[in-house]
Image: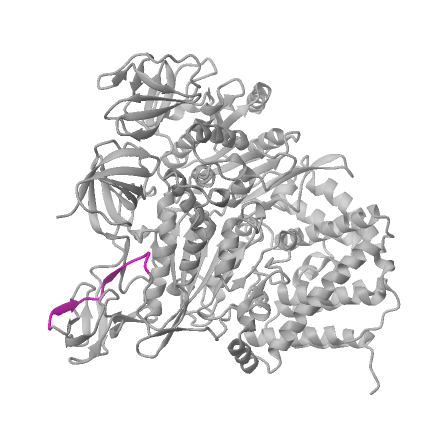
């Protein structure tokens, strides 16, 4: 019999429940308030008192209200029909809620229970299967959605029967499998999985080696992220975190994008709802929304569900990864998730860590990032989850606990810099503070040199050096004055400005410049480096600034033009003429 | 105080702090309102039969045998057409000498809008101030604060924006407003002949600080009535949100909560979001736009209050005194309207985004030139021109006394570019250059 209880205390959304039976940590329960059942999660147990966090407002709740325990942890429902939906943090389908305002205690089923899916079997009776083995597939939008043995089924099974190709609903039994003892297990197209546990139904997790193109030059060229990699974007407000995440959602080369809008502005999610169904996916020619699923728990939605939302998103990602797909998971912002943990720790009167965050924040963040990765599935196929989270450091201070914890866990660091944002140098990723650990991997270097340019990695490091030297030269100029330094300091500074303006900066609102394919990035970097390697003749420092501004202006127009168009080539020729004006030709 | 049937009355208080009282009671709901010794209070904690009440007006003089009446409902206000033109206190009681209003009772701090039912904001709110319309365009359904030091004329600028903006209804939520500022708003509203469009909920410095906590949600519940039930475009003015946050920290301190950064409660972000996220464009055409004031201490935006605010709101407006022209301007570097991309170049002329960016970039060059000059370095010809441009740009466009339409602002921009710079220095897309450079100069 299921455990029940009665409310004995209420502090905001932390509720104490006197229970009459066993409860488990993280068990879900429902508190009855005036006939409406409010979903809650057990977060602490002392004696017969369970401390639960309610995922809704506790207004009008009273001592003595009845509580039912559900016997399981917070779960998501996995099956065909997840793609393109808009879920809240608990995987309720927001489109099924018809009213303008959210109603407390209204929970909607995440999938379509009536729709029929065209099922094609991939196994036959007698085949050996384990958890996550592909039994068949249905066509979900443009994805071949694999129907798998539920992740919860440990051990080996034999397929006893499988339905023939045809139309089935998600609740129809499509296969029956038997375990070693002959016990039968019917399988439908739906399964459930507790979000706080990682899905481990794969053969091995490998070191990532393949670079994921994002179309953003400052990432792809300077600090690339890999398929199955992890990265994070910290930055003060107003530095373009969200614009950058949206750009990644639009242009990154992934099969599936999961956007977890975690405690952020509702209007930002509305932007995705409004624009993605209209925007074309440059790779497939379909609409962007067809590869995007949104899990949104905006800042005014209940705090406890905010914590759940990132886990819900990750679990959906693991489900699709098990189908051999490349998933990109974007979470904006993981700081809000950490703050939700802090609010709860505070109500539980736990001893606080730095800035009142819970002591185990680092461990929680690290565990979460570890769920991403490039895996080889049981059948030898690869699948990946690339995870990029944003962090909103309090006061823009990168020494605060969430940023520091994340830095230990993520492999790519894209630091958004206030001075860059102030001077409208977008994306405001600081080229010198940021890094990608993947660039140091031998297998990643080999991949880049083979795929883009034989000297690519060398070129990348060369441009980083130019940027650093340019910054140093600029500091000297500022200290000693324009005429207090040799002319070549100015030249050095302006060469770094070319890389800044042409490679780092990108106009997210321009139709052409907003995404730059890797071949184009190769062309532009080669061109820019050729200029940087050229020695120029200047009589005085006053000639340097206008000359390089002309070069930058032409290169910028190239960025705005269709790649390899006649306009683009014309501009390239203009540029060659400009370079020839002052180029020093060595006679050797 | 009249009590109704079904209300529970108690008269034994077991604990009194500066802001809270506790007593033994049963059948009490969370968030429920009560009256303690004639003062309004709200349930903030229930442990068994021990109820803790937050007394909004403070606990001075409350005896242990005070009468405690539970009202059986969360905080409510009466909404209706009769609110128009009236001034109320934080509880929604009239302070203008007029009669009580009749209307439907609504709970304050109600549920959030389903994100999928929101519409993308797309209507520009023109204010005539180029520092806003040109560089930081406002859009209906937006939430944006002025970040200002206490000595800056933020309330005057906000009143000016409110009077010029085309809104059906303006709702003022005043928190810790000085009596002088309260009278200022009152006279601005009356002189503009706009009184029937205005509703004010005001907590002045003469009222207890904790009462302020009710003001934003009361004002926004009234706003929701006009925006949802009557499909109106509602503009909500909240000043000063820093004083609201101070009241939050007082209460959390009294509740023995562990403070996080700058002595603010750990829930500050969620508390502020529950207010600002009420800004919305409804599908039926109604909207709530929030313009707030967050006062800073010495311009420090890393303090927890402006910092959390900045992460929630859709941009921020900074006021600054430009000593070159002796006027207050909207600072183009630190100000930002995140929603401007939805309207500029779409609802306004196509050259708007590029003119805006080019002008700000050139203004930044002037700032660099000024640093050079101050450090005693020689200025180049470009530096000199940039400085001359900056002065004219500041005077003709950034100053808050400007009142022109957006096309005129753009034309002024082109004129200034042509007067001081070459085409290459301005660096605008060629097709726009061809279209506007000659014709506007």
Instruction: State yes or no: residue A449 in magenta.
Output: no
Q: Say which quarter of the image contains residue A288.
A: bottom left
Looking at the picture, how far across and down is residue B427, in whole percent? 71, 60
Q: Which corner quadrant holds the C terminus of chain A? A: bottom right
**Span of residues in magenta:** A182-197
Asked whether residue A180 appears in the rendered view, the answer is: yes
| Position of residue A210 measured from the top left corner of the image (x, y, whole percent) | 48, 75
Q: Position of residue A559 (x, y in %)?
A: 63, 68
Q: Nearer the viewer, residue B312 or B121?
A: B312
Viewer-side residue, B103 vs B175: B175
Location of residue B26 with respect to A445 vertically, above or below: above
Say which quarter of the image contains residue A57: top left
Q: What residue is rendered at 73% in x and 64% in y?
A: A470
Within the image, what quadrant is residue A429 found in?
Answer: bottom right
Look at the picture and state if A359 lies above or below A580: above
Q: Position of residue B256 (x, y in %)?
A: 43, 31
Q: Name the side, left or right, on which B109 lies relative to B189.
A: left
Asked if residue A188 is among those painted magenta in the image, a careful observer would answer: yes
Q: Which color scheme did the rendering employ for the protein?
A: one colour
**Going by the image, does B272 lie left or right of B156?**
left
Q: How many marks?
A: 0
Residue at image x 35%, y 73%? A324
């Amino acid at each position: 019999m299921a455990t029940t209880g009665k409310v004995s205390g209420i502090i905001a959304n932390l509720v104490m429940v006197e229970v009459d039976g066993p409860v488990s940590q993280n068990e879900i329960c429902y508190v009855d308030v005036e006939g409406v059942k409010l979903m809650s999660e057990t977060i602490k147990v002392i004696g017969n008192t369970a401390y639960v966090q309610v995922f809704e407002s506790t207004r009008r709740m009273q001592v003595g209200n009845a509580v039912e325990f559900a016997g399981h942890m917070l779960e998501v429902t996995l099956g065909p029909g997840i793609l393109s939906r808009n879920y809240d943090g608990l995987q309720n389908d927001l489109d099924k809620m018809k009213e303008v305002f959210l109603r407390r205690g209204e929970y909607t089923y995440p999938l379509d229970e009536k729709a029929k899916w065209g099922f094609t079997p991939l196994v036959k009776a007698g085949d050996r299967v384990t958890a996550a083995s592909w039994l068949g597939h249905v066509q979900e939008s443009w994805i071949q959605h694999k129907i798998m043995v539920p992740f919860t089924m440990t051990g080996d099974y034999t397929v006893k029967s499988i339905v023939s190709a045809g139309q089935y609903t998600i609740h129809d039994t499509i296969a029956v499998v038997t375990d070693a003892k002959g016990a039968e297990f019917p399988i439908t197209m739906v399964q459930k999985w507790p979000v706080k546990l990682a899905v481990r139904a794969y053969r091995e997790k490998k070191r990532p080696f393949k670079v994921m193109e994002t179309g953003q030059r400052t990432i792809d060229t300077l600090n690339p992220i890999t398929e199955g990699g992890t990265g994070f974007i910290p930055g003060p407000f107003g530095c373009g975190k969200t614009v950058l995440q949206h750009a990644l959602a639009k242009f990154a080369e992934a099969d599936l994008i999961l956007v977890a809008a975690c405690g952020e502005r509702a209007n930002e999610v509305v932007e995705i709802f409004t624009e993605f169904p209209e925007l074309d996916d440059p790779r497939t020619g379909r609409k962007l929304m067809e590869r995007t699923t949104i899990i949104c728990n905006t800042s005014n939605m209940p705090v406890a569900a905010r914590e759940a939302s990132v886990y819900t998103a990750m679990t959906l990602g693991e489900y699709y990864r098990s189908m051999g797909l490349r998933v990109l998971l974007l979470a904006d912002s993981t700081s809000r998730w950490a703050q939700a943990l802090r609010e709860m720790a505070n109500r539980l009167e736990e001893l606080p860590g730095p800035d009142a965050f819970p002591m185990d924040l680092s461990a929680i963040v690290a565990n979460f990032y570890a769920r991403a990765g490039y895996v080889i599935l049981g059948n030898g196929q690869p699948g990946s989850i690339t995870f990029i989270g944003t962090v909103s450091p309090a006061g823009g201070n990168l020494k605060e606990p969430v940023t520091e914890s994340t830095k230990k866990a993520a492999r790519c660091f894209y630091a958004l810099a206030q001075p860059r944002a102030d001077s409208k140098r977008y994306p405001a990723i600081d080229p010198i503070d940021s890094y990608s650990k993947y660039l140091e991997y031998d297998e990643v270097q080999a991949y880049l040199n083979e795929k883009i340019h034989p000297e690519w990695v060398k070129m990348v490091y060369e441009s980083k050096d130019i940027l650093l030297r340019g910054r140093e030269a600029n500091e000297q100029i500022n200290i000693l004055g324009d005429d207090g330094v040799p002319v070549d300091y100015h030249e050095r500074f302006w060469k770094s400005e070319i890389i800044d303006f042409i490679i780092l900066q990108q106009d997210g609102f321009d139709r052409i410049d907003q995404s730059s394919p890797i071949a184009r990035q190769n062309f532009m970097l080669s061109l820019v480096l050729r200029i940087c390697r050229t020695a120029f003749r200047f009589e005085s420092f006053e000639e340097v600034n206008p000359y390089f501004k002309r070069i930058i202006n032409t290169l910028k127009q190239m960025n705005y033009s269709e790649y390899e168009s006649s306009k683009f080539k014309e501009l390239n020729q203009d540029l060659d003429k400009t370079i020839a004006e002052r180029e020093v030709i060595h006679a050797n | 105080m009249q009590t109704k049937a079904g209300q529970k009355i108690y008269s034994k208080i077991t604990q009194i702090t500066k802001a809270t009282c506790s007593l033994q009671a049963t059948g009490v709901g969370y968030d429920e309102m009560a009256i303690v010794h004639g003062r309004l209070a709200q349930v903030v904690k229930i442990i068994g039969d021990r109820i803790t009440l937050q007394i909004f007006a403070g606990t001075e003089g409350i005896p242990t045998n005070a009468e405690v009446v539970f009202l059986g409902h969360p905080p409510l206000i009466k909404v209706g057409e009769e609110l128009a033109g009236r001034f109320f206190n934080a509880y929604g009681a009239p302070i203008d000498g007029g009669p009580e209003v009749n209307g439907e009772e609504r709970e304050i701090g109600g549920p959030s809008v389903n994100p999928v039912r929101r519409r993308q904001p797309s209507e520009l709110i023109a204010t005539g101030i180029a520092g806003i319309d040109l560089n930081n365009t406002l859009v209906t359904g937006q939430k944006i604060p002025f970040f200002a030091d206490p000595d800056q004329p933020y309330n005057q600028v906000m009143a000016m924006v409110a009077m010029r903006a085309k809104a059906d209804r303006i709702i003022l939520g005043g928190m810790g407003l000085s009596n002088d500022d309260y009278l200022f708003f009152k006279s601005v509203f009356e002189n503009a002949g706009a009184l029937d469009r205005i509703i004010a909920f005001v907590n002045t410095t003469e009222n207890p600080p904790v009462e302020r906590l009710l003001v934003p949600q009361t004002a926004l519940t009234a706003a929701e009535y006009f925006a949802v039930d009557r499909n109106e475009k509602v503009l909500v003015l909240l000043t000063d949100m820093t004083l609201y946050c101070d009241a939050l920290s007082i209460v959390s301190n009294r509740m023995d909560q562990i403070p996080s950064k700058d002595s603010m409660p750990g829930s500050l972000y969620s508390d502020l979001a529950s207010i600002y996220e009420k800004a919305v464009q409804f599908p039926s055409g109604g909207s709530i736009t929030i313009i707030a004031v967050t006062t800073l201490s010495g311009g420090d935006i890393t303090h927890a209050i402006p910092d959390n605010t900045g992460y929630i709101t859709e941009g921020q407006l900074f006021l600054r005194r430009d000593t070159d022209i002796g006027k207050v301007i909207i600072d183009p570097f630190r100000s930002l309207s995140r929603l401007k991309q939805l309207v500029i170049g779409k609802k306004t002329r196509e050259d708007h985004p590029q003119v805006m960016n080019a002008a700000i970039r050139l203004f930044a060059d002037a700032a660099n030139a000024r640093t050079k000059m101050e450090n005693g370095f020689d200025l180049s010809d470009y530096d000199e021109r940039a400085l001359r441009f900056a002065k004219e740009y500041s005077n003709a466009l950034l100053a808050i006394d400007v009142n022109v339409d957006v096309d005129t602002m753009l034309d002024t921009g082109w004129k200034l570019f042509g007067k001081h710079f070459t085409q290459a220095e301005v660096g605008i897309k060629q097709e726009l250059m061809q279209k506007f450079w000659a014709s506007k100069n």
